[in-house]
Amino acid sequence: MKIAIIGAGNLGISIAKGILKNSIASSLYLTKRHVDSLEAFNVEEFVVITKDNKLAIENSDVVIFAVQPNHLEAIFIENKPFFKDKHILISTVTGFSIQNITEILGSSNGVVRAMPNTAIAVGKSMTCISTMDGEHTKLKSAVKIFSVLGQVLVIPEHLMQAATVVCASGIAFWMRMIRASTQAAIQLGFDAKEAQQLAMYTAEGAAHLLIATGNHPEEEIDKVTTPKGCTIEGLNEMEHQGLSSSVIKGMMASYHKIDGIKDMP
Ligand SMILES: NC(=O)C1=CN([C@@H]2O[C@H](COP(=O)(O)OP(=O)(O)OC[C@H]3O[C@@H](n4cnc5c(N)ncnc54)[C@H](O)[C@@H]3O)[C@@H](O)[C@H]2O)C=CC1
Ligand SMILES: O=C(O)[C@@H]1CCC=N1
């Protein structure tokens, strides 16, 4: 597969790492305005680092756009002549609908929206994907790529804003939970390295239990909460302090921030 990533920043690099780790590209073009920071990728012959988006697009079949929302329109306008029917154009750009893209390109070009998260670097992204009705072939190709790099859920496009919060921003929210747990573990006597190890692998275990069993979290929580025990004491105190409420409110705030994000300077 010949793949280009237009905008090799935080997400683009994470996607590139996942692609390289899983050997799914016969050629990989990485573009960026200032390419110096991409030197580390300059080790494989089939990886091309360039500022030239046209070159990347013309030499690729799959083109993944991972630029900031306020840069996408100019990049589309500049490169419109180089988009061909063969191209699978995949936008990871937040708040930029297929309708917005169609207005710029004059047609949708079968564009697919994908919302991965940075765990794509280690093949563990939860990626939501949408396209226009009827674009089954390009959607299937996108699903195939992202399935190698983690889990995929095809969703109607109207849920993409929600998916951005739950999955793309979500990884940051989970990191903060792990950090909080680490801080508590240090206060309780572990050194920082051990504290993080305990927090990370406990979080991993919790997720794996739910994935493997299909159980509801409360069913697993019931198994841990000894009556009058320390777990329910801790959980209830967390809820008195607003744990669930603050997570939900934070995610709602994140969701509403996406309204109009594409027009932000
Ligand atoms: N960072 C994340 O975890 C996620 C980000 N997204 C979305 O992905 C997009 C990229 O996000 P980040 O990687 O965080 O941003 P970033 O700012 O780290 O990366 C964007 C890159 O695009 C490059 N760029 C700007 N103009 C360019 C041009 N004309 N040609 C080629 N490259 C150009 C910049 O130099 C930069 O390296 C955003 O739209 C964001 O909303 C979506 C899901 C997750
Ligand atoms: O924070 C942001 O706006 C981007 C979109 C999702 C993750 N990062």
Image (spheres, helix red, strand yellow):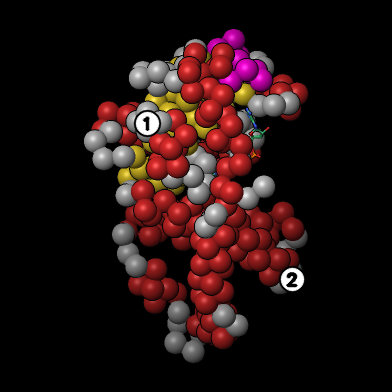
Image quadrant holding the N terminus, namely top left
* Rendering coords of residue 29 (x, y %): 56, 19
Residue at (32, 45) in percent of width and height: 154
- When the figure is inspected, residue 69 is found, relative to residue 215, above or below; the finding is above
Residue at (56, 17) in percent of width and height: 54
Q: Residues within 10 Å of mark 2 (few under 14, many from 20)?
A: few
Q: CA distance from mark 2 to mark 1?
A: 57 Å
**First in sequence: mark 2 vs mark 1:** 1
**Residue range (magenta):** 44-53
Of 33 and 43, the residue lying toward us: 33
Q: Which callout, 2 or 1, points to the residue nearer the camera?
A: 1
Whether residue 153 appears in this view of the structure is no
Residue under label 2 = 187
Q: Quadrant of residue 107?
A: top left
Q: Amino acid at mark 2?
A: Gln
Q: Amino acid at mark 1?
A: Ser
Residue at (52, 41) in percent of width and height: 93
- When the figure is inspected, residue 116 is found, relative to residue 230, above or below; the finding is above
Image position of 107 (left or right of 181):
left
Q: Residues within 10 Å of mark 1 (few under 14, many from 20)?
A: few
Of 236 and 7, the residue lying toward us: 7
Image position of 115 (left or right of 189):
left
Of 112 and 190, the residue lying toward us: 112
- When the figure is inspected, residue 195 is found, relative to residue 152, above or below; the finding is below
Q: Is the CB of the residue bearing disc 1 within 8 angstroms of ligand 1?
A: no
- When the figure is inspected, residue 190 is found, relative to residue 61, above or below; the finding is below
Say whether residue 47 is magenta.
yes
Residue under label 1 = 107
Residue at (50, 83) in percent of width and height: 232
Query: SS class of the residue under badge 1?
Result: loop
Image position of 153 (left or right of 229):
left
